[in-house]
Amino acid sequence: MSSKLALLDRDGTLIEHVHYLSDPEQVRLLPETVEGLLALKRLNFRLVLVSNQSGVGRGYFDEHAVHRVNERMQELLRPHGAELDLMLFCPHAPQDHCPCRKPKTGMAEQACQLLSANLKGAIMVGDSDCDMELAQALGIPGYRVGTPQLPGLAGLLHQL
């Protein structure tokens, strides 16, 4: 059985949303993150972070800060066996019109290339309009967390 891709937003989906997060000490997993990621792994999904990080493009922090935050998230996931397979981010500001900035498809295309995968059976999980717009642009199902239908990631299992 081939693996499918679960494209996952970071802030507000996997971890608590902190405006322009750059300090790894502020990383807090959302309550259902571990359970949801483990369920996705059991369903043979490869877990791929796709995150807009315009704080870099706006000059608020550098790419190293994003890597440190992402690594802290992995450190919190690792003891549970819920690590992500790939972490991608777009460091550009919206006005840069970058092809990797969600809802454009560049990060998803990069994930497919890096993981020798395709979008057959893929899903997008996020908490914002741009996450759902990315799913639509890719022609894959989009699941929005933080809604009455899907308060957290663990509830995704019931919708797949």
Image (tube, rainbow, N blue to C red):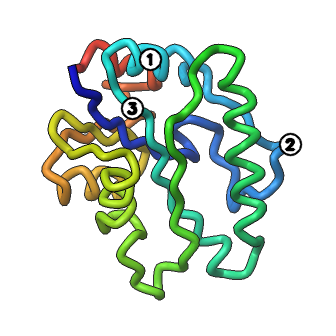
Q: Quadrant of residue 5?
A: top left
Q: Residue at x 35, y 36 (%)?
A: 6
In the figure, 57 relative to 87: above or below? Answer: below
Mark 2 nearby-residue class (10 Å; few <14, some 14–19, many ≥20):
few
Q: Which circle marks residue 154 in the picture?
A: 1
Q: Which residue is mark 2?
A: 25
Q: Residue 105 location, x and y as percent?
A: 29, 64
Kindly identify the amino acid type of the residue bearing the numbered disc 3. Answer: Arg
SS for dot 3:
strand
In the figure, 158 relative to 101: above or below? Answer: above
Kindly identify the amino acid type of the residue bearing the numbered disc 2. Answer: Glu
Query: In front here: 49 or 137?
Result: 49
Q: Residue at x 74, y 49 (%)?
A: 69
Label 3 vs label 2, nearer the camera? 3
Q: Quadrant of residue 45?
A: top left
SS for dot 1:
helix
Q: Which residue is mark 3?
A: 46
Quadrant of the drawing holding the C terminus: top left
